[in-house]
Image (spheres, helix red, strand yellow):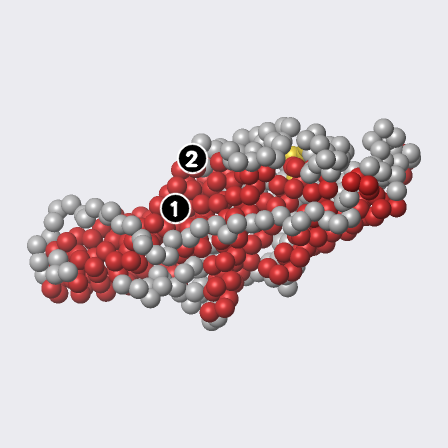
Amino acid sequence: MAHWFHRNPLKATAPVSFNFYGVAGSPAANKICNDLRTTRARLLEMFTDITCNPEIMKNATDAYFSLLQGFIASLDGTTQENKMRFIQNFKWTDTLQGNTPSAQQDAVFELVSMAFNVGLWYTKFASRLAGKENITEVEAKDVHRSLKVAAGIFKLSLFFLGSCRTSHIPRLITPAEKGRDLEPRVIDAYIIQSQAEAQEAIELKHNANLIASLAFETANFYQKADHTLNTLDPEYSSKWRKYLQLKQHFYMAYAYCYHGQTLLAGDKCGEAIRSLQEAEKCTYWILHKLCKEYRQTKGPGTTAKPSEQQFFLKLGGLIKNTLDKCQRENGFIPVEPPLLELKASYGLVEPVAFELPPLSEQCTPQVYGTFDLTKGAKNDKAKPKEEEVKPVKEPDLKPQKDTGCIIS
């Protein structure tokens, strides 16, 4: 399989104690606060634990989110805001803007930011698996599913931010600034990229026409993601966009290549040659330029040498071999390349719907009633000093030898 995927860094966050001295007026209320602190810390640890898998991640996510919803959902039977929603301040960095955090005193901000990081983890888990040597069929399916789950999580983020018409969740009091992770354009780009990568992660053994159609659809996904980011500041979006552009042209080359095979099978030798020439001259050679630009462009995210990846190198050989076969057949070669109007009938990827866990059984109306915001903190000196947001030290996982992969 051995795919290469660009990855932006994980979001970093400041520790949160959930120590509401005096406000939590019962042992049960204090237990909720303590459990919030421990389940949050546990979930953050899982982001950088190389032994973590989707099952462990889901359990850690459910444990924290089931409690956090007690600070968002209405527990008193009314439609009024949850009185605990704005009690705690949360700080999070953004994947594109370095270590300068955003801060909001809003549990919805925490929920969406943490969910965003969970989505990022699934993309990184998929990337780590996809880069393994001798990947198994089970692992290949895990790559595919993880990317679809990631797309579903990012899509849920839009829902919680009130960006969907069906959303009943209150919007953030302070809307996300331009280029921040919770801005709809950035989330959209992550959704589309995850769908595109899930689609390219499928090993298909089908006819050339369907492969060409899927490659064309995948190229369109990457182009759409790139266009979604075109109004953001190039200082922090250029590297990401180079990756999206590179993958777009890569799959356009595949589309032209396999379309050429389809034309050749239909005794349209000249048109097949023209399609292969388009893949070779107008698309494949553009990739060399984009590979170089990607390596030279500064910005957040992983740095690699895509032109040296086996999946990339195989493309050139595939185009050359197919073109040589076409040229042996000869035929009239049209001046214009064929117009690709391909539509895949099978294999298109949709996000896996991500659902929040049920509200924790600890969060009952009775316990909720023992939180008294009028009392405030009894002992200000007992409050821990606010800590700075430290960058996430992600595991240094060097890519393994690339065994190559193509849609075939």
Q: Which residue is mark 2?
A: 230
- Count of marks overlaid on the render: 2
Q: Is residue 126 visible?
A: yes
Task: Please state the horizontal and vertical placement of residue 353, each as a whole percent of the image.
Answer: 52, 49
| Residue at image point 42% right, 42% down | 225
Q: Nearer the viewer, residue 165 or 320?
A: 165
Which mark is first along the chain, 2 or 1? 1
Left or right of 25: which side holds 109?
left
Q: Which residue is mark 1?
A: 221
* Quarter of the view holding residue 364: top right
Left or right of 209: which side holds 311?
right
Instruction: State whether residue 283 is above or below residue 369.
Output: below
Numbered label attached to residue 242? none
Instruction: State whether residue 11 is above or below residue 101.
Output: below
| Residue at image point 38% right, 53% down | 348
* Quarter occupied by the N terminus: bottom left
Q: Nearer the viewer, residue 164 or 329?
A: 164
Instruction: State whether residue 401 is above or below residue 103.
Output: below
* Quarter occupied by the C terminus: bottom left
Say what amino acid the circle numbered 2 marks: Asn
Mark 1: few, some, or many residues within 10 Å (few <14, many ≥20)? Answer: many
Left or right of 79: which side holds 280?
left
Task: Please state the horizontal and vertical placement of residue 112, each as a whole percent of the image.
Answer: 62, 41
Q: Find the residue positioned furthest to the front.
A: 77
Say what amino acid the circle numbered 1 marks: Phe
Question: Gap in Å between the C-alphas at discs 1 and 2?
Answer: 15 Å
Task: Please state the horizontal and vertical placement of residue 251, each as a whole percent of the image.
Answer: 34, 52
Task: Please state the horizontal and vertical placement of residue 158, each as a whole percent of the image.
Answer: 54, 38
Callout 2 secondary element: loop
